[in-house]
Image (cartoon, helix red, strand yellow):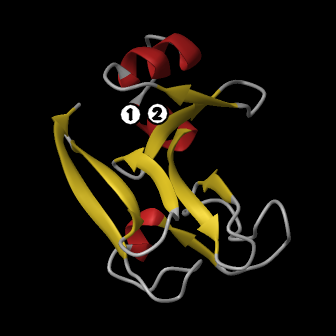
Amino acid sequence: MPKIYQFGCNKCDFRLPGGWGGIMYVTDDDGKRIICSHPGEMYTVYSVIGQDATHEECMNRTGFLSNCYCSDCLHQFSLDLERDTRVCEKCGSEKVKSIKESVGKRCPKCKDGKITATDTGAIC
């Protein structure tokens, strides 16, 4: 079970979504991404693509949406970092970072603090 973290700047009010950095998804027959809530991700996968799905089918139709933000406009959104282009859906900037990549780095908002991951003590 993964630990749950709170992410944000240690100097200003810049906060990012809590959790473990993202969420799994499966694509339906039309290519629409369906979120696989935790726990029970595989229940959702098999309900979308069928109980007889092969391992290869599961691998081809699942992915992980990472929580990301734009360093230019601070817009927060999710991307599959292995499949999607790193472009902000709001301003078009290519300065997109995932939460996990940002821990320990300078805050994009105040430029003074650092992004921290604080263990909430919860697991999911």
Mark number displayed over residue 55:
1
Q: Residues within 10 Å of mark 2 (few under 14, many from 20)?
A: some
Q: Secondary structure at mark 2?
A: helix
Out of 56 and 44, give the one closest to the viewer.
44
In the rendered structure, the answer to whether residue 36 lies left or right of residue 77 reads left
| Left or right: where 86 falls relative to 67 | right
Give the x, y percent position of residue 43: 39, 15
The quadrant of the rendering that contains the N terminus is top left
Asked if residue 1 can be seen in this view, the reply is no
Proximity of marks 2 and 1: CB atoms separated by less than 8 Å: yes
Tell me what residue is drawn at x 65 percent, y 53 percent. 77
Residue type at numbered disc 2: Cys
Q: Residue sitting at 34 percent across and 19 percent down?
A: 40
- Image: 30 above or below 118: above
The residue under label 2 is 58
Tell me: residue 66, above or below residue 57.
below
C-alpha gap between disc 2 and disc 1: 5 Å
Q: Is residue 86 visible?
A: yes
Circle 1: is it few (<14), some (14-19), or many (20+) Cα within 10 Å?
few
Q: Which mark is residue 85?
A: none
Residue 83 % position (x, y): 62, 59
Secondary structure of the residue carrying tag 1 is helix
**In front of the other: 2 or 40:** 2
The residue that appears at 49% across and 56% down in the rendered structure is 16
Assign the C terminus to one quadrant of the image.
top left
